[in-house]
Image (cartoon, rainbow, N blue to C red):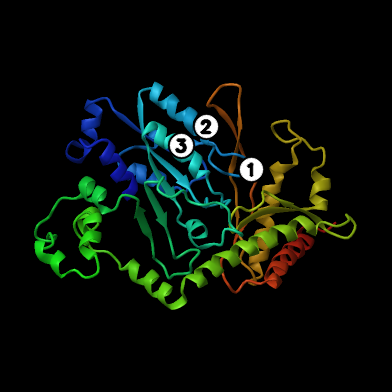
Amino acid sequence: MHALMVARNQRFPEIKHGGIVALAKACVRPVIFTSAHAHYSIEKSAIAAGIGLDNVICVPTDDCGCMNPVALRELAHKEIAAGGTPFFVNATAGTTVLGAFDPLAEIADVCEELGIWLHVDGSWGSPLALFADPSVFEYPIPAGRINSLTINPHKLLGVPLQCSFLLMRDGLGVMRETLGLNASYLFHSAPEDDESADGFGLHQQRQQLGGSWDFGDATMGCGRRPDAIKIWISWRYYGTKYFSDRVGRARQLAVEFADMIASRNTTRTSESGDWKLFIRPQSTCVCFWFIPHSEADRHAGRKNNNGSTNPQCWWGDVTKALCNRVNATGKLLLDYACVDRFAPTSVPSEYNKNTVPFFFRIPFNSPGVTVDTLEAILNSIELAARHLYSN
């Protein structure tokens, strides 16, 4: 929300004093673009910032769940032609469901071409780009080409809740200019003679931050929890290598688990069902189905309400039933999710949307997870299938 409001006030400076009314009088319609798989917080922020949900354009993703930069460019030009003013793109480093990484360099090309603020929601995925060895993770954040980045160390880095950060490419100055009110009873400029007593270059750093270490006037809140202490203590105690090893291990577990799923299928007579990997994991999140043979036989050739014989329509019901059965044992807690897929039509910038049936979704993080844990997950799902769907 802070990134969105800074971008809004920078692009439309009249809004700081005149509010949304000033834009309405000028017949200006701000437009936001976001991945169709983005976290819902961007829509909540659009409501809070007065942009409105109708002006949040969801950009279709490719088959791997990454924002389609070609579609982004097409939709941006479409909105411009319709009288809209695109000013903010919300890309994602680690989407909520699939853990996908949007092609940030290509999206940055579009944003630079059209003068749009590029924000990256890296709440849970960005530590992979920041800490993981490039040999195990190949989705970097393009240096200097994004305006703002969010990161939640309380996710992949294991820092206690809540610990969230907004990183600004251009420092606090742009935030203080667009959101600050200069409340003199709270915020005071530094004495001029500080520089003479500065042996650590702090005066220069402070100027880069916008003239003050106090970022209270640069944000919407005043008092706040000391999130910085949590990440600082963790980093001092564990060190950078621990963070690197932690996220690298989580990534490796995801790859190993996906490989286990892909190789799990044997002959029909020796197994109770088929394992189906949704996509190869890009980060630490693995999404898959288990389809019992008995259910496949029961639905074979049966037409759905829309006349289709596509078996995937019932996969979601099986997934939910298996998940609930496993969770009821109290030994494991699994979860499921669904996403939309998009296919281009013959009309430019238009896409058909198809909702994928519910699938198992497991994001790996805990250093305590082992290969035995992965085996236990797969065995528990097969056992649940035998209880629920045995012939």
Q: Position of residue 95 (x, y in %)?
A: 52, 50
Q: Which mark is residue 109?
A: 3
Q: In which quarter of the view is residue 188 placed?
A: bottom left
Q: Which mark is residue 213?
A: none
Instruction: Work out whether residue 211 or residue 92 is closer to the camera in this orientation and state it.
Output: 211
Q: Nearer the viewer, mark 3 or mark 1?
A: 3
Instruction: Work out whether residue 321 or residue 184 is closer to the camera in this orientation and state it.
Output: 184
- Give the mark nearest the N terminus, 3 or 2: 2
Q: Position of residue 338 (x, y in %)?
A: 60, 47
In this rendering, position of residue 107 left or right of residue 384:
left
Q: Amino acid at mark 2?
A: Ala
Residue at left 50%, top 51%? 93
Estimate how packed mark 2 is, as few (under 14), some (14 to 19) or many (20 or more) residues with alpha carbons within 10 Å: many
- Give the mark nearest the N terminus, 2 or 1: 2
Measured Cα–Cα span from mark 3 to mark 2: 13 Å
At numbered mark 2, what does the secondary structure look like: helix, strand or loop?
A: helix
Q: Is there any visible trace of residue 173 in the rendered image?
A: yes
Task: State the residue position of label 2.
Answer: 71
